[in-house]
Image (cartoon, grey):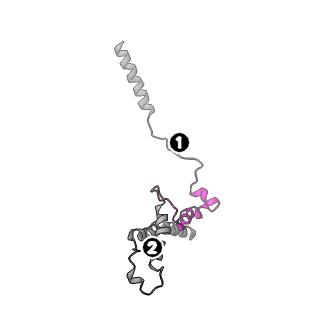
């Protein structure tokens, strides 16, 4: 009785291990009807798919996979406020006595870094696609 129990468990285990083979299922893993490059050719969508990133980058309201939109805050709000703080007073003695406003390098750099690292490559890719 005990040996037949072990034999049946062994048979069931071997059947399950044979059924778990994953070779030859490439056709099942293919997503039929997906929005691939050949489908994009039909209505010229390959030219417009990159514009989502570019348009969101105008206001830096694009989430670069970091879960926040803080670059929008630094570029639109802090960077311009800091810049205008240097020139808000027309007095001739203002420039050398300005201790209130200090240009924060991280805020200014983030505006340029995100523009050149995320927006311009997508715009360049869009330009290269249209040159074909």
Q: Which mark is residue 90?
A: none
Tell me, yes or no, whether the highlighted magenta stretch contains residue 58: yes
> Residue at 45% across / 40% down in the picture?
23
Residue nearest the observer in this picture, 90 or 102 = 90
Q: Residues within 10 Å of mark 1 (few under 14, many from 20)?
A: few
Residue nearest the observer in this picture, 2 or 105 = 105
Residue 94 location (% of width, % of height): 42, 83
Tell me if I can see residue 79 in this picture.
Answer: yes
SS at mark 2 in the image: helix
Residue 99 location (% of width, % of height): 38, 76
- Mark 2 and mark 1: span between their CA atoms? 56 Å
Tell me if I can see residue 120 in this picture.
Answer: no
In this picture, residue 14 sits left or right of residue 62: left
Q: Residues within 10 Å of mark 2 (few under 14, many from 20)?
A: some
Kindly identify which residue carries mark 2: 82
Tell me, yes or no, whether the highlighted magenta stretch contains residue 111: no
Note whether 16 is above or below 66 in the view shown. above
> Residue at 41% across / 31% down in the picture?
17
Note whether 2 is above or below 116 in the view shown. above
Kindly identify which residue carries mark 1: 28
Residue 84 location (% of width, % of height): 48, 76
Residue furthest to the top in view is 1
Query: What segment carries the magenta color?
Result: 36-65
User: Which of the two discs, 2 and 1, labels the residue nearer the N terminus?
Assistant: 1
Q: Quadrant of residue 58?
A: bottom right
Q: Quadrant of residue 1?
A: top left
SS at mark 1 in the image: helix
Residue 21 location (% of width, % of height): 44, 36
């Amino acid at each position: 009785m005990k040996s037949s129990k072990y034999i049946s468990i062994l048979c069931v285990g071997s059947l399950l291990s044979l059924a778990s083979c994953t070779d030859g299922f490439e056709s099942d893993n293919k997503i039929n009807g997906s929005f691939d490059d050949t489908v994009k050719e039909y209505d010229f969508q390959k030219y417009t798919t990159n514009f989502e990133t570019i348009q969101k980058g105008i206001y830096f309201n694009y989430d670069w996979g970091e879960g926040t939109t803080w670059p929008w805050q630094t570029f639109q709000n802090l960077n311009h406020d800091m810049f205008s703080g240097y020139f808000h007073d027309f007095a001739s003695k203002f420039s050398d006595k300005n201790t209130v406003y200090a240009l924060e390098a991280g805020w200014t750099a983030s505006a340029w870094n995100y523009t050149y690292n995320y927006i311009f490559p997508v715009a360049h890719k869009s330009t290269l696609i249209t040159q074909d």
